[in-house]
């Protein structure tokens, strides 16, 4: 059994008390002037909406039409999703993407098979079906929208793609 004994519980309480008093001392004796001279931080959301406003219903994005696979910008890039994914749900028990992209379905659906890297777990072991760390496809693969970039960027394709 791994229950804390009376003594170790007491020790832990004492350690907590020490930490708390150190924190309190810092709060009280820290130089007050420093905080007073700093200008208040002006928070602003990228979309210009109020910082506390919740996201609009849906995500407000209009996704592009289905198109052929898109070029990649660097060799390790998760390929962009060239089609709509509305209603393609991924739950614990069901993954709509795999309905087409699984190795067993790719031939009849014409979708690209998920890559062999998607069968490796985080310890590097090869599995016989998609690895849990590759299960939630849209963590890495994103659908496309012709939206104005929120911030500028000067990214150029990686050397391996030139
Ligand atoms: C109804 C079948 C279907 C479903 C469901 C589906 N796809 Fe696809 N997907 C395709 C087809 C077909 C292509 C295009 C293959 C081609 O033209 O080479 C494609 C292409 C892709 C590509 C581009 C591959 C490349 O090499 O550039 C990605 C990434 C992708 N899909 C991800 C997803 C994800 C993530 C989901 C789930 C959210 C999903 N797909 C659901 C059929 C499907
Ligand atoms: C952790 C990030 C990550 C997740 C999650 C993920 N992928 Fe990928 N995927 C990648 C990367 C990176 C590549 C390109 C390098 C490679 O092939 O491993 C890729 C490649 C692909 C390709 C192209 C394969 C080829 O031969 O060109 C397809 C199709 C694909 N993924 C579909 C999926 C689907 C469907 C899921 C969900 C079941 C998924 N991916 C989950 C990162 C991810």
Image (cartoon, rainbow, N blue to C red):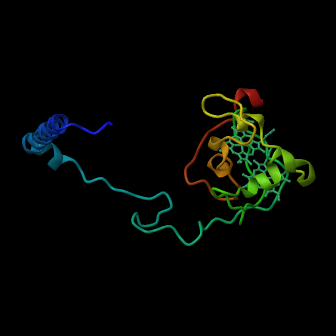
- Quadrant containing ligand 2 reads top right
**As drawn, 13 above or below 75:** below
- Residue 132 at x, y percent in the picture: 64, 43
Horizontal relation, residue 95 to residue 14: left or right: right
Q: Quadrant of residue 28?
A: top left
Outermost residue, front side: 1
**Residue under the point 65% across and 51% down:** 138
**Residue under the point 75% across and 37% down:** 128
Q: In the depicted view, which residue is nearer to us: 19 or 67? A: 19
Horizontal relation, residue 78 to residue 99: left or right: left
Q: In the depicted view, which residue is nearer to us: 22 or 155? A: 22
**As drawn, 58 above or below 36:** below
**As drawn, 161 above or below 82:** above
Residue 93 at least partly seen = yes
- Residue 118 at x, y percent in the picture: 71, 38
Q: In the depicted view, which residue is nearer to us: 32 or 156? A: 32
Q: In which quadrant will I find the C terminus?
A: top right
Q: Quadrant of residue 79?
A: top right
Q: In the depicted view, which residue is nearer to us: 156 or 65? A: 65
Residue 82 at least partly seen = no
Outermost residue, bottom side: 57
Q: How many marks?
A: 0
Q: In which quadrant will I find the N terminus?
A: top left
Horizontal relation, residue 83 to residue 91: left or right: right
**Residue under the point 92% across and 53% down:** 108
- Residue 122 at x, y percent in the picture: 60, 33
- Residue 67 at x, y percent in the picture: 83, 55
């Amino acid at each position: 059994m791994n229950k804390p004994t009376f003594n170790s519980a007491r020790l832990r309480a004492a350690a907590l008390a020490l930490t708390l008093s150190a924190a309190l001392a810092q709060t009280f004796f820290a130089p007050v002037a420093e905080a007073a001279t700093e200008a208040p931080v002006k928070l602003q959301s990228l979309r210009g909406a109020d910082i506390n406003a919740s996201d609009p219903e849906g995500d407000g994005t209009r996704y592009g039409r289905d198109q052929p696979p898109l070029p990649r910008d660097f060799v390790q890039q998760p390929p962009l999703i060239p089609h709509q994914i509305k209603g393609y749900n991924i739950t614990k028990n069901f993954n709509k993407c795999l309905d087409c992209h699984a190795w067993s379905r790719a031939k009849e659906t014409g979708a690209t098979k998920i890559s062999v890297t998607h069968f490796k777990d985080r310890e590097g072991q090869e599995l016989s079906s998609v690895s849990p760390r590759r299960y939630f496809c849209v963590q890495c693969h994103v659908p496309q929208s012709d939206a104005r970039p929120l911030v500028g960027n000067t990214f150029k394709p990686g050397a391996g793609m030139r």
